[in-house]
Image (cartoon, grey):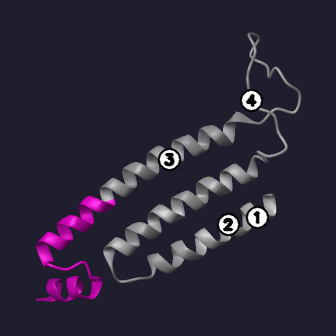
């Protein structure tokens, strides 16, 4: 199962790289979102989620079951989701303002407009 997850992460990174190298600002935004999801899956795969028990802490602050999952990667994923949401909203607003100013979301046309 981890092998399938690693292949999926590789495909998401490949798709993100492909989208980031396009000229359209919306495809760049999709690439940034895919890259964020790929990093989240990579963090999840690093915590070995399949062979671990649920991380439920008892009253003493220690895990109740032996071999429980580490909650740190889960906290990192949650933080990355929040940061990725803020970054995607900022990039979306930036792309919209560039489109409203230049009439296109093509990077080459935006460069030509700045030269004039």
Evaluate if marks 1 and 2 touch, with contact meaning CB atoms under 8 Å apart.
yes
Residue 110 lies left or right of residue 89; in this view the side is left
Question: What residue appears at the point 80 percent right and 64 percent down from the top-left corner?
Answer: 3
Chief secondary structure of the magenta span?
helix
Q: Which residues are magenta?
A: 91-116
Q: Is residue 102 left or right of residue 14?
A: left
Q: Does 39 sit above or below residue 56? A: below
- Image coordinates of residue 11 in percent, x first then y, are 63, 72
Q: Which residue is mark 3?
A: 81
| Occupied quadrant, residue 89 | bottom left
The structure residue drawn at horizontal position 51% and vertical position 80%, both measured from the top left corner, is: 18
In x, y percent, where is residue 100?
13, 70
Q: Can you tell which of label 2 and label 3 is closer to the viewer?
A: 2
The Cα atoms of the two marked residues, 2 and 3, are separated by: 18 Å
Query: Which residue does the numbered mark 1 point to in the structure image?
Result: 4
Q: Can you identify the residue that label 4 sits on?
A: 55
Q: Is residue 63 above or below residue 49?
A: above
Mark 2 vs 4: CB contact within 8 A = no
């Amino acid at each position: 199962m981890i092998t399938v997850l690693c292949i999926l992460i590789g495909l998401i990174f490949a798709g993100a790289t492909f989208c980031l190298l396009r000229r359209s600002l919306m495809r760049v935004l999709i690439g940034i979102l895919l890259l964020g999801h790929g990093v989240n899956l990579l963090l999840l795969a690093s915590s070995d989620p399949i062979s671990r028990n649920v991380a439920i802490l008892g009253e003493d602050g220690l895990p109740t079951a032996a071999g429980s999952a580490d909650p740190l990667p889960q906290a990192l994923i949650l933080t990355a989701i929040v940061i990725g949401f803020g970054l995607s909203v900022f990039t979306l607003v930036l792309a919209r303002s560039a489109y409203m100013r230049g009439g296109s979301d093509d990077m080459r046309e935006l460069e030509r407009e700045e030269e004039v």
